[in-house]
Image (cartoon, helix red, strand yellow):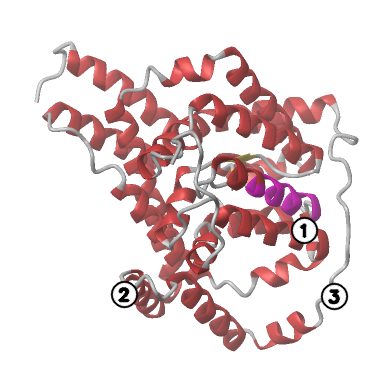
Amino acid sequence: MNPSVKPANKFDLPEWAGAFGDLGTLIPFVAAYVSILKMDANGLLIAFGIALIAAGTIYRTPFPVQPMKAIGAAAVSQSMLAAGLGSAAVVGAALTTGLMWIALAATGLGRRAASWVPRSALMGVVMGLGFSFMLEGIRMMSASVWTSALLLALTLLLLGRPRVPAMLVLLAIGVAMALLNDPNLTRDLGALKPEFKLPALGWSGLSANDLWTGFILLALPQLPLTFGNAYLSITEENNRLFPDRPVNERAVAYSTGLMNLGSSLLGGIPMCHGAGGMAGHVQFGARTGGSSVILGGILLGAGLFLASSITTLFRVFPQNVLGVILFLAGLQLALGSRDTGAEKTDRFVVLATAAFAIWNVGAAVLFGILAHHASRRGWMRF
């Protein structure tokens, strides 16, 4: 095969199972934006759907599209709500984020900055992100420990049997649990009425204050996390798992910028290509961009026809099921950092950077760069 020709996307059962491997981050953040900030799910879901379909079609790998986590956490925090931050500032953050990443791609600054990050520091970031996903998954499972333990054990057993799609079994059990635990859910699902709706343009109502607030309070604090997780780590993760379909930093920077411009135009939220999302898709069977296209098609359809009912639909995914998905995505991501090099100093940089990444990815990248160069110059000895 010509190495420049990427394999075709597949849409078989493993791709369908892998398509749902990122629900552990997608659903909680989207639900928070819709329920707390009262954002319209119509444009939000359509933007995710289009971005996922484009990513899967272009990259031909399980390339993820996720909500930007630092922005999401800040936007729905009590302090931001008390200060009057609303949905318009979130749209402003998506627009300014898109402009920032297009500038980084066009000028080459993103690629030059990436060249400063040593591999040991990058591996530490990947390991730390994996641990943070696993810890968050455990927190989500802790509300019903024994049920969660059984679900996790069953999923682990099924993952060793490729013919049985572990994710689809897990989701089926989750839906059954949700229906049993919430007697009103069956009635509410039966009352759903699909209604076609196109999103309003998100740029039309933006003010200069919305752009400034979104940029200063949301977009800028997110930048270090996106740089470490959704720029460096996703490039490393993709090229490690799929060397026949490599990506480069400039392409990832452009796609990050373009999908955020598109999201803001539709009134959506800031999005990124998180490495944990790819780990989740791969953990449950995805091997091509078909999984991204499948999930994108589902979200696009939900945005066009079921936007007003999205909170009801999300109720079929219990918290502990999402926790199992997130835990296993983190496990897959952490396993990807095993190639740490033989030198003791490299292992130190990886482990110490991982510890910082659990707390703050931006600080972890900075620490990893400094620790790597300090050890190479003999300023630190182990």
Return the residue at label 2. Answer: 157
The residue tagged with tag 1: helix, strand or loop?
A: helix
Question: Which quadrant holds the C terminus?
Answer: top left
The residue tagged with tag 2: helix, strand or loop?
A: helix
Query: At x 18% / y 11%, what residue is drawn?
Result: 377
Q: Are marks 2 and 1 in contact (CB under 8 Å)?
A: no
Q: Are marks 2 and 3 in contact (CB under 8 Å)?
A: no
On residue 193, the disc is 3
Return the residue at label 1. Answer: 303
**The magenta stretch spans which residues?**
42-53
Left or right: 81 in relation to 290? right
Query: At x 58% / y 42%, what residue is drawn?
Result: 68
Overall secondary structure of the magenta stretch?
A: helix
Say which of 258 and 290 sits in front.
290
Say which of 168 and 82 sits in front.
168
Left or right: 375 in relation to 66? left
Query: At x 74% / y 41%, what residue is drawn?
Result: 263
Instruction: Give the vertical position of 247 relative to 134 (above or below).
Output: above
Left or right: 111 in relation to 260? left
